[in-house]
């Protein structure tokens, strides 16, 4: 996360795909961070990480307002998995979710020769937001810049007065999700 003041904070991918483990010898990170920025509280789930709903719920409990999901997919079905999970995370956790992928071809880079992407910003699904819960999206597989204004106050109103209140109505007396760190093992 590059902030306007020039500082940089990092979130490492937690769940490498089987391909990334096998061909790129990647290992997952072990921290899930929240970043306070001048435009809100932000969490980051990288690509495959968004397919694990527990991670977004933990970030939601830390009161993120925007979830950023950078991704790289080589096929449309891989892209749709990331997109649909990101849309679900926006609804489940009453936050904005921005997905940003790379498109084009890198023929001289092994295992990254083709890509498929469409960047977008998703919202919760309620009256104060677009009927399809899509704030904006780019043209598929086209290099573009997407600029979207989001109203963080609408999230607070939704959480307190929405037609459904996922955050307030969670049955914390029945279940919870916790992050295990070295001291919990």
Image (tube, rainbow, N blue to C red):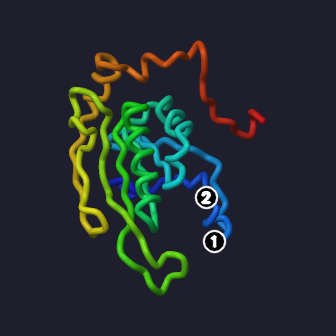
Considering the image in quadrants, where does the C terminus appear? Answer: top right
Left or right: 132 with respect to 55? left
Relative image position of residue 144 (x, y in whole percent):
24, 65
Vertically, is 142 above or below 62?
Answer: below
Relative image position of residue 49 (x, y in whole percent):
54, 49
Left or right: 25 with respect to 161? right
Q: Is residue 1 visible?
A: no
Q: Between 35 and 90, which is closer to the camera in this rendering?
A: 90
Relative image position of residue 100 (x, y in whole percent):
37, 58
Relative image position of residue 179 (x, y in whole percent):
63, 35
Question: Circle 2 sits in a helix, a strand or a loop, which is it?
Answer: loop
As measured in the structure, the alpha-carbon distance from the residue carrying label 2 to the one carrying label 1 is: 10 Å
* Residue occupying the far top of the picture: 173
Which residue is drawn at the image coordinates 49% and 49% (left, top)? 45
Q: Is residue 55 visible?
A: yes
- Mark 1 = which residue? 24
Which residue is drawn at the image coordinates 29% and 63% (left, top)? 140
Which residue is drawn at the image coordinates 24% and 62% (left, top)? 139
Vertically, is 8 above or below 36?
Answer: below
Which residue is drawn at the image coordinates 43% and 38% (left, top)? 89
User: Dots 2 and 1: beta carbons under 8 Å?
Assistant: yes
- Mark 2 = which residue? 16
Q: Between 34 and 146, which is closer to the camera in this rendering?
A: 146
Query: Dot 2, crowdedness within 10 Å: few (<14), some or many (≥20)?
Result: some
Left or right: 88 with respect to 124? right
Considering the image in quadrants, where does the N terminus appear? Answer: bottom left
The disc, 2 or 1, on the residue closer to the chain's N-terminal end is 2
Query: Dot 1, crowdedness within 10 Å: few (<14), some or many (≥20)?
Result: few
Question: Circle 1 sits in a helix, a strand or a loop, which is it?
Answer: helix
* Residue occupying the far bottom of the picture: 108
Vertically, is 169 above or below 66?
Answer: above
Vertically, is 76 above or below 177?
Answer: below
């Amino acid at each position: 996360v590059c902030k306007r003041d020039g500082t940089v904070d990092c979130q490492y991918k937690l769940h490498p795909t089987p391909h990334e483990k096998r061909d790129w010898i990647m290992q997952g990170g072990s921290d899930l961070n929240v970043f306070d920025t001048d435009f809100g509280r932000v969490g980051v789930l990288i690509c495959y990480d968004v397919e694990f709903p527990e991670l977004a719920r933990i970030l939601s409990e830390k009161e993120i307002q925007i979830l950023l999901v950078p991704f790289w997919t080589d096929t449309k079905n891989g892209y749709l998995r990331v997109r649909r999970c990101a849309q679900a995370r926006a609804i489940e956790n009453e936050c904005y979710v921005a997905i940003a992928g790379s498109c084009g071809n890198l023929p001289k880079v092994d295992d990254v020769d083709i890509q498929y992407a469409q960047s977008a910003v998703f919202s919760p699904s309620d009256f104060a937001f677009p009927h399809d819960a899509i704030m904006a999206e780019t043209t598929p597989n086209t290099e573009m810049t997407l600029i979207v204004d989001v109203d963080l106050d609408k999230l607070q109103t939704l959480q307190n007065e929405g037609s459904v209140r996922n955050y307030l109505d969670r049955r914390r007396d029945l279940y919870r999700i916790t992050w295990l760190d070295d001291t919990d093992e």
